Image: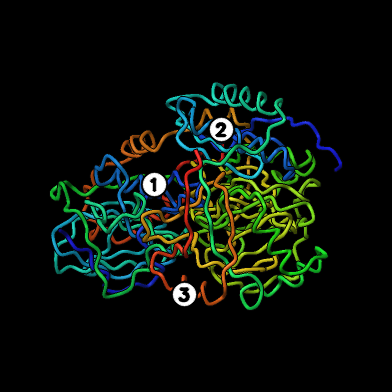
Amino acid sequence: MTGEPTLAPEILPAGPDGVLLRFGLKPQPLAMAAAQVLAGELDSDLPHGVVEIAPALVSVLLRFDPAATSRAVLARDVLARAERIAGSRPAPPAPLRRWTIPASFGGDDGPQLAEVAELLGVSQDAATRQLCTADLRVLTIGFAPGQPYIGLLPPAWNLPRMPDLNPNVPAGAVVVAVRQIVMFGAESATGWRQIARAAFRTFRPERDEPMPLRAGDAIRYTPASAAEIATLAREADGMGGATVEMLR
Amino acid sequence: MTCLRIIRADGILTVQDMGRPGHLAQGLSRGGAMDRQALIEAAALLGSVRPLAAIEMAGAGGAFGVSEPTRVALTGAPMVATLDDAPLRWHASHRLQPGQTLRIGGAQAGVHGYLTPAGGIATPEWLGSRAAHLTIGIGEALEGGSALPCHPDPDPDRPDRVIDAAARFNGGTVRVMDGPQTGLFDEAMLDAFFGTDFTRGPRGNRQGVQLQADARFTSDQAAGLASDVIGPGDVQMTGDGVPYVLMAECQTIGGYPRIGQVIPADLPVIAQAVPGAVLRFQRLTAVQADALYRSDAVALREAAGRCRNLVRDPATIPDLLSYQLVGGVTAGRELEE
């Protein structure tokens, strides 16, 4: 371990009705944990005048009503919270809830599992087991509605993106790179490697909860057969057999 | 219920309103009208206290009819409009009767025109908005033969109105406030960016608009940046240093560095810039930008002050259309100052 730099949180303008609190420029685990702690704290104790909170990997955006508060007042409040969190060398906060999501690993559903296992120097079964037992959280949601960035996988999974794009991965594709997982909501091109496929759909506009995942949610993948995933994919709600439990 | 019939669609027609803010954490951008000023000017013309859901017409309009007497506002990019072959003034509201045909042709300047019925379009809402967001499968491009439900005109006898539209249809100078990543660009690169005349590139849609220049604008710190929250107005540098301005349907998280953010008051200039239009950028600090901030409600009151009754019968003034187009292009020199 190379040792992480200390966090130096910055508060920055983000449009006429926004401020961004950023713990670092790179996706270092400590900065990511701090951003998650801050987002959780802001959610439960919203500063006056804030109308929206959006956590990213190492930052949190706050949108405010300029008629109700000012950039300066909000910046002072958020920076004070961030400095306290940064000084505490934070760990990722305990999740509020955990999703268990069936996925089919390898084969047609995970055409690059073999390649990933080889890069890790383990068997495909062992790679699958590592992913399914890792302590995973939704780090942020983005790129498309409801689509999660999930992490962090163990350090050995710090795999680079591929030099050439995967031209077409299907909806539900579970792809990996840089210790993270993305689960695609729709067919997509990607530079990440596809190792599994879930029947869970991260975005269904007609569902009561069109975008059910939240940043901070714990994620546990559970292995299923290709046939089981194909059956689950036919269910109308797009939940693909995923279950959620409240943890606190 | 009043019906707005689409007899023929010539441009890309979608229902748009002010969008659905508040879902960034779930990866959903606000969406809504590309030129929000056009919906504000339409509300001012129609006497509405808030912007209404309208038809956004990209490039060209089509032919339209109504089932009940209703006023409509024509705002945004000026397009040639006729009512049963009599010319209609753009940047104005007009009374439509059942059986009449409103024809809206190609844009004379700018890109996005708006047709707003006085009661507002009344299609079902999704997450509090009627706006089509085609990239994620919300709503649809409107086709000839379809019809949209509208709320009835609350004041159908109100006289026709005309507005001095804010200048935004021929490019010009656009103000950019410092954003979270402005500091990732060195001073020389910032000076170069704010000293360059760009043209609006051939690539552009509701997600973003490409800018062209010979120079490239890169940051030494771009490699390995953590993806961050992005939004409409952000000026993003792709890997090869070509700027894109992010628009209504942009993604919510991105990894390219952003040199700043076009302030909302000037974003319609980008939305309405046709390929080849010249665009320049003026840098503002956050303090300067904050001093210019106006809420939509304030912008609507200000737009109402630019409206007056349309007292002359436009059909009797043969050169009216060209007169109005010139006015729309040159008014409001505040952008240059």
Q: Nearer the viewer, residue B326 or A210?
A: A210
Which residue is drawn at the image coordinates 53% and 31% (left, top)?
A42
Q: Nearer the viewer, residue A229 or A215?
A: A229
Chain assignment, label 2: B
Q: Secondary structure at mark 1?
A: loop
Chain assignment, label 3: A
Label 2 – label 3 distance at C-alpha: 54 Å
Place residue B44 in its image quadrant.
Answer: top left
Which amino acid is tagged 3?
Thr
> Which coloring applies here?
rainbow
Chain assignment, label 1: B
Total numbered badges shown on the rendered structure:
3
Q: Which residue is mark 3?
A: A231
Mark 3 or 1, which is nearer the eye? 3
Q: Is residue A209 left or right of residue B210?
A: left
Mark 2 or 3, which is nearer the eye? 3
Place residue B56 in its image quadrant.
Answer: bottom left
Q: Secondary structure at mark 3?
A: helix
Q: Position of residue A235 (x, y in %)?
A: 41, 70
Label 2 – label 1 distance at C-alpha: 22 Å
Place residue B145 in its image quadrant.
Answer: bottom left
Q: Is residue B275 left or right of residue B88?
A: right
Label 3 – label 1 distance at C-alpha: 57 Å
Q: Which residue is mark 1?
A: B165
Q: Which residue is mark 2?
A: B289
Mark closer to the chain start, 2 or 1: 1
Q: Residues within 10 Å of mark 1 (few under 14, many from 20)?
A: many
Answer yes or no: are tags 2 and 1 on the same subunit.
Answer: yes
Which amino acid is tagged 1?
Ala
Q: Secondary structure at mark 2?
A: helix
